[in-house]
Image (cartoon, rainbow, N blue to C red):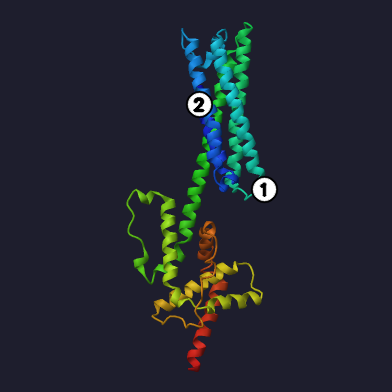
Amino acid sequence: MNTAGLLYVGHIQLMAVLWHPERRTGGTPRRTVLAWAPFYAATVVAMAVLYARAEPSGEARPLLFAPDYVRSPDAVAFHLVYFAMLTAVVTSTVRRCRRLLTSPGPPLTPGLRRCAREFALAVALDMLHVLCVLTAMAGAAGGLRLDGFAEAAWLATAARGLVANYSLVRLSVSARRRERRDYQALRPLWQTVVRADPQLVLAPRPPLERLGTRIALSRRLVEIRDGARSLSPWMSSAPARAVDQLVRRGFVGFDVVAAQAAATLLYAAEARGRGLPPADTDMLLAALPGEDVPAAAERDHLVLVARHLSHPVVLEALVHARRMAAAPEARG
């Protein structure tokens, strides 16, 4: 149990390393693993040797192993080695979690900040385990049985597992919920850009793949990007200019770039659907507004574009763009 508990805390320590912004500079997780691996290996080997040398016999009472064998030097050394390594790992993990919360680099998401705090609490509970076992051992060495402390120590370990697992499960469920929410929010945009060319939709997914929300969301993002590219010949600059005019007239409460992208795509999809020729060279838009957003922000940007498709400013901009397109035809 002691070895499993130590490795479990080591897993929490590794998670804290992977979340730290320093890892983006490259090599940090590898250096940390290489630095700590010898200590973990040496501790596990030393504990195995000391446990074998202690030669525990008699009635097996795993929870009371520490006070039952307090007269055995090897058993005492076994626990001291375990406690020393556990204390070092807990201290390192708590300090790393604190740095995570106060790092001047890119801020953590609210979910990761809460998870870091709960991880620090989880590993700190192991120090309560150490305190309880040491109390039971000290009592047994003085002839006083404090078995309740030895048994309560493992309740602290169980509480650590519950806190850490609950934190990870909540983080996973929250991420899946956000992915499902964004997948549904992107549906109107997806329908807009692929309606004129259904061949852009990827082949049907295998049954097992349908269970993966992240995979479904990634497919939808790919199909939206391909659909937008297929509409590029019909992307006139008129809708984006119309949005700018509405902004100058005092319209507020919306994202200008997302509104321009939404108006441009709606206009291009409508033009292609009506069989109109591509936009004139002098009116052709060089790039879809927002196309230069970083890859990490693309999903949020496209969700924002999808939510602007029915925005009053976008609908008003389309009316202006249609008038601008109809004016030259009327003069002609």
How far across and down, in percent of the image, does residue 31 sit?
55, 38
Q: Residue at x 51, y 83 (%)?
A: 282
Give the image location of residue 234, x and y in percent. 45, 77
> For mark 2, what is the residue?
41
The answer to whether one can see residue 161 in this image is no
Q: Secondary structure at mark 1?
A: loop
Whole-percent x, y for residue 310 in the image: 52, 69
Q: Residue at x 48, y 90 (%)?
A: 329
- Residue 93 shows which numbered tag? none
Q: Quadrant of residue 146?
A: top right
Task: Single out the mark in the foreground, 1 or 2.
Answer: 2
Q: What residue is pinned by disc 1?
A: 104
Q: Residue at x 56, y 21 (%)?
A: 82
- Cα gap from disc 1 to disc 2, whole angstroms: 34 Å
Q: Amino acid at mark 1?
A: Pro
Q: Secondary structure at mark 2?
A: helix
**Residue 79 quadrant:** top right
In this rendered view, identify the residue nearer to me: 310 or 235. 235
Foreground pick, 270 / 82: 82
At horizontal 41% and vertical 58% (from top left) the residue drawn is 219
Kind of residue at badge 2: Ala
Against 247, residue 4 (above or below) is above
